[in-house]
Amino acid sequence: MQRRFKTVSIVGVGAMGTGIAQITAQAGYDVYLYDQDEGAGQQAKNNLKKIFDSLIERGKITRKDAVEALNKINVVETLKDAAQSDLVIEAIIENLEIKQKLFQKIEKEKRAETILASNTSSLSISAIGSALEQPQNFIGLHFFNPVPLMKVVEIIPGLQTDSELSYVLQQYVKDIGHTPVIAKDTPGFIVNHVGRAYGTESLKILGEGIASVSTIDTILREGLGFRLGPFELFDLTALDVSHPAMESIYSQFYQEPRLRPHTLTKTMLSAGMVGRKAGKGFYEYHNNQKVLEKTEKKQTMPKGVKIPAIWIGAESSDDYKKIFNLLTTIGATIDHGERPERDSLTLLTVWGQDATEASIKFNVKPENSLCIDLMTDLNQQITLMINPSTTSQTIAQYCALFNASPMVMIRDSVGFVAQRVIASIVNLACDIAQQQIASVEDIDLAVKLGLGYPQGPLAWGDKIGPSKILRILEGIYESTHDPRYRVSPWLKRRVILGLSLTNKEQDIV
């Protein structure tokens, strides 16, 4: 599609606005900066010069390209001047009334063909546009911070937006080197909607006393490949940002159980323990560096612990083989009997169940029993789970057995930690697909690029196996009866039909 416009104004030149201006100018558009604070526009341009100089030094761009991009950036002193561009992007405070008033002022000054766009991350595009005389010329254009590095932009048409605008802005987003995804105007759009599962489920696990903050972070970072554990991420983004976002999306979806926040973050926010910038959140920080908890430091294992043979309880031959190979690698003695010997330890694996249920299922002594989670990469992270009857001797024996391995131990939980979190993420993504908030392809693209997940949630669900995700969720729901874990019909239908979660449905007439 041919480019429809050449000039872009950025209203609000904070971190987001400056980032949008940078990549827009680098793409060859004429950019106009406006901010209500006197001198802010010029300061933003000065900051961009420093950024371009740094990029030159690091060999990221040539001096010629940097000079051309900087020359494309202009500072304007009035909102009327900013309103004359082909596209006006607003990047100011997240307040509905303030945004509405700003766009009303711009609308009075703009040309008829000017497109208006909001960079809002949480407000309804239709609600902002309702204050305009021509809401058909208004659309959402949600960038992520830092803008030059986060290569995805959500395009959100409001209920009254002209359908042509989405196509025009897709071309603009591609021009600036980013990936456009189309989202329905719903709370959180795609990325901030799917992203609720990672944090809220981890908070629920912490609240149940299953594992410590650092243990949960370790399991999800090392075992599943997330860049940051959920509590590391909370501390980085800060609870004064993330907690209101969780409450807002939960409220806007009329208390949808899958999105339920936790009282812990509200209490921490009230106490000022918002994260890294405050020096204390889920972790403590000294000189902006995380202070290790005692549980994060290497523990000295007791000497002289005798390790009995290990009997394996698994539901499938594949699961049995994984545990057998792991135990063989670390030099364990295997009990090959149909039933465990009297003194043998038992190592069990289940999906969507807890260690108590596992000991009953395999009819073994619960005091000698632990469970192992096969959801994680066992070369990177081993998670063992005790039950309420597991003895201190059994725990010491397993600690000695896995002393040289990257092992953590948790309390009894339906679905361990990793199973619960990844199943919640996939299930929520399936529900978003069911609601047609975005296409299957755009859901995976947006989450992978916008949240930095190892894979898109639907592709990840395929890799694990949709039937296994279903099994985990059904097991947790059967045990807890918490509607948070109710299975998305979209997921269940695909399991029944043997379809991939990335399978595209046919359009209907």
Image (cartoon, grey):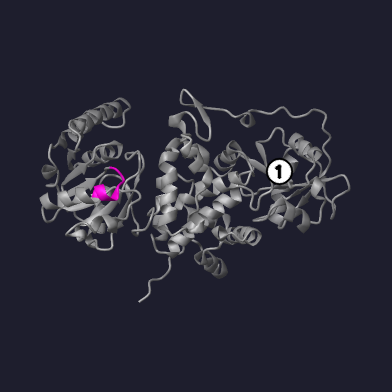
Up-down: is 60 above or below 122?
above
- Res 483 quadrant in image: bottom right
The residue that appears at 18% across and 34% down in the rendered structure is 68
**Can you identify the residue that label 1 sits on?**
326
Q: Which residues are magenta?
A: 93-99
- Res 163 quadrant in image: bottom left
Q: Position of residue 325 (x, y in %)?
A: 72, 45
Q: Is residue 502 visible?
A: no
The residue that appears at 72% across and 39% down in the rendered structure is 329
Q: Is residue 303 left or right of residue 296?
A: right
Q: Position of residue 381 (x, y in %)?
A: 62, 40
In which quadrant of the rendered image does the N terminus lie? Answer: bottom left
Of residues 163 and 59, the one nearer the viewer is: 163
Q: Is residue 120 left or right of residue 66?
A: right
Up-down: is 129 above or below 178?
below
Label 1: element kind = helix
In which quadrant of the rendered image does the C terminus lie? Answer: bottom left
